[in-house]
Image: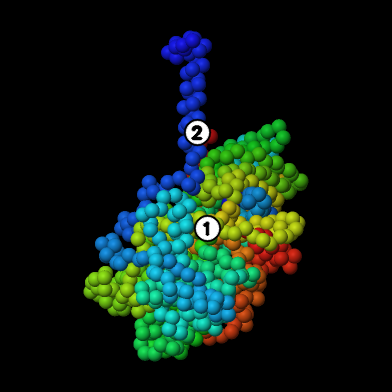
Amino acid sequence: MGAGLIALYVAAPSSVLAQGVAWAVDRASVTFQVRNAGLAVHGSFGGIEADVCFDPDDPESGSLVASVDPATIETGIEMRNRHLMRRGYFHVEKYGAVVIRSIRLRATGTGYAGTFLLSIRGVERQVEIPFVFDTSGSRARISGSLTLDRRDYGLGKRSLILADEVTVHVALTLVRGAGSRTPQPCATPPGRGAGAHPARDLKADRASVRRSVRTRTARAYLAQRPRSIPP
Amino acid sequence: MRVDWSDRTSPGGRALRLGMLAVLLGAVAIAWSRTDASQPVRQQVIPRVWDEEALRDFSLPLPNTDMQVEHITQEYYYALRERVIHKTYPMYHPDFEPPGYLDSLRALAPASALDTDTIDTEEEWIRAGELVFDAPQLYLPLSRPFFNAAALARANAPVTRDGTFPFQRYVVLENSDVRVGVLACGTCHTRVMPDGSVVKGGQGNYPANRLLAEVVLAIGGEPPLRAHREQFRAPWIDHPSQTMMDTITRTRVAEYFRAVPDGVHTRQGTSPTYPASIPDLRGIRHERFFDATGIMQQRSIGDLMRYAAFNQFVDHLNRYGDFVPSLGNHPGPLPPPDSVTSVVNGPFTRFSDAQAFALAKYLYSLEPLPSPHEYDAETLALGERVFIEEGCVTCHPPPHFTNNELTPAPGFEPPEDHYDRFPIFDVSVETDPGLTLYTRRGTGYYKVPSLRGLWYRDLLFHDGSLSLEQVLDPSRLEDDFVPAGFRGADSPSRAVPGHPFGFELGEREKAALIAYLRTL
């Protein structure tokens, strides 16, 4: 059950002189909810890495790339956590991080929405996520929700008791990049989201989980991205 | 007026055609509805017990070894002598035996209880299967001091309301020879409840190991130790629980046996150090695997028949490299089927396919009994909620309260191909791995058991260590914990790790969960 949904950061788009505004993540929360035998199970992820480049007045100039570590999944029951890390679900030994990256961001009548590519367990699918972005001086808050079918990503099998639909909530508190008082354009390639935050503390049991050397975090994805993306 | 039914336009013709159609449909409906138990079953194909194609993937591989288990051939199996299902008679506790009872039995002629050629309906197959279930495999003279009524009384074997021991029955052979029949399926798989009622197929409470301890001490010489090795030895396993059997004494064997409580048993292929909880057979048709270790699969009724055949000691003819349990180190061919014997139960015999089919039909007819326990709705609602919130429902989902999957024991990593072959819940619940890693019944796994019928089971976990309350008690992780069930021969206390659920529940939630579980 569960699917990582990642921080919504906006990274600079294609050109060397990037547009958008660079943000650093101050706090991040990625939680999910799924029904099991009729009752809601709540969980969360840590190990969030992200890059945000977003101008609320020019959303189409921005981009977001982020990842979350499924080996940090927490559902309140240790054995269930371990089960979800194994091959029937996230299979962390083989697949590593969950990654989301934006294709297009736009304004809507009530906020914003984005088209993203969500990659979980080696499966990449396009998803639509509405989100809100509120600013207050040099700080901002971005939040959004996504409902997906876990089986689309190979997360478990058909079950009489475990629902297929998982709802993921993301909430991020952002500060302007480099602590500047004025909006700064995103650099290319964008640096990683600045600062540690509580959600990045990994579970103590990581020593028992052998990580794949092919773990792809947001930073690794960004390092491989072409420097110039065609408009 | 004559109706022309071929006239599609005439009202009469249409009416007649409709009427004929109605009669035809009614006949079909009646035929379909006649599927009750009184209908003939003989046209069903009785599966062949020793089907080599079915046996190919029937058993799970041994753990942590490349060695393959070699079964006897189909030809060899069917050359074993077929059993006769004799008519049997109740065994009374000495305090309740009617005067002259045994003399009345001596006056009887031997009789067969079962002629499978005359069985026709589902009901008849089930009744026949109950006779097979109760049919002893071994007949002991009354003069033998073991396993007779007096021995069971000394062992405080439970007694039914009518004063009988339902685990064993008398058999009348030629020349008024009345014998004690033992080693029936029902010997171990019959439970006498505190009120004297009988649950056939339930977690048996026959005092098998206490009776065996008497036998081991009373019979001198080598045979008890040869029997011990035939029952339990697995020489490819390099573990103290195995190697100690080569030098064990009869006194020590008896100590191990006395440490095994009723409801748990050192059946063949386990070990005195790692016995197995006697399972509840009611609801067995819904199980994907047999035994706590999931040693054999159930893909059809034929597989249950095969499982029964193996457990009537035919598995003592398995070959594990050069080792054959009934023969020890024996690289050469097996003795001829008509002469191969076991120290444990004498000459090898087998079920006929029809007998095994009847037995399986009977076992399939057994469902867990409805619980007599009553609780208020609020308690049960809370208990069910706890059951879900604590994650129990993930492995124990309704309707059978098992997901029918295998969990790996600590120290066992499933081979890659197992994930395609078997349903594996690939997180260990970390219960003691001994039974599944250090015995002949080992697979490296434990199956997820069904929780139905918990109310009439005493002892839980694969080794019958714990009561239901103790499963949820975190103090069982401490070395000074006293298990309600199996403790081992060397200490009155020991930690019972694994399955760490429910430890942090409050008393109200715990009581509600236990109440809920007792209603399943």
Q: Sequence-wise, which precedes: disc 2 or disc 1?
A: 2
- For residue B29, the mark is 2
Image height of A114 relative to B422, above or below: above
Q: CA distance from mark 2 to mark 1?
A: 30 Å
Q: Of tags 2 and 1, which is closer to the observer?
A: 2
Q: Quadrant of the C terminus of chain B?
A: bottom right
Dot 1 falls on a residue whose secondary structure is loop
Badge 1 is on which residue? B366
Q: x%, y% of residue B103? A: 46, 77
The residue under label 2 is which amino acid type? Ala
Given residues B175 and B402, the one toward you in this image is: B175
Q: Label 1 is found on which chain of the structure?
A: B
Q: Label 2 is found on which chain of the structure?
A: B
- For residue B229, the mark is none
Dot 2 falls on a residue whose secondary structure is helix
Q: x%, y% of residue A171? A: 68, 49
> Which corner quadrant of the image does residue B6 belong to?
top left
The residue under label 1 is which amino acid type? Leu
Residue at figure coordinates x 53%, y 60% from the top left: B282
> Is residue B218 at all visible to an observer of this figure?
yes
Given residues B432 and B295, the one toward you in this image is: B295
Q: x%, y% of residue B251? A: 46, 89
* Other-residue count near label 1 (Cα within 10 Å), few / some / many at <14 / 14–19 / ≥20: some
**How many labels, in total?**
2
* Other-residue count near label 2 (Cα within 10 Å), few / some / many at <14 / 14–19 / ≥20: few
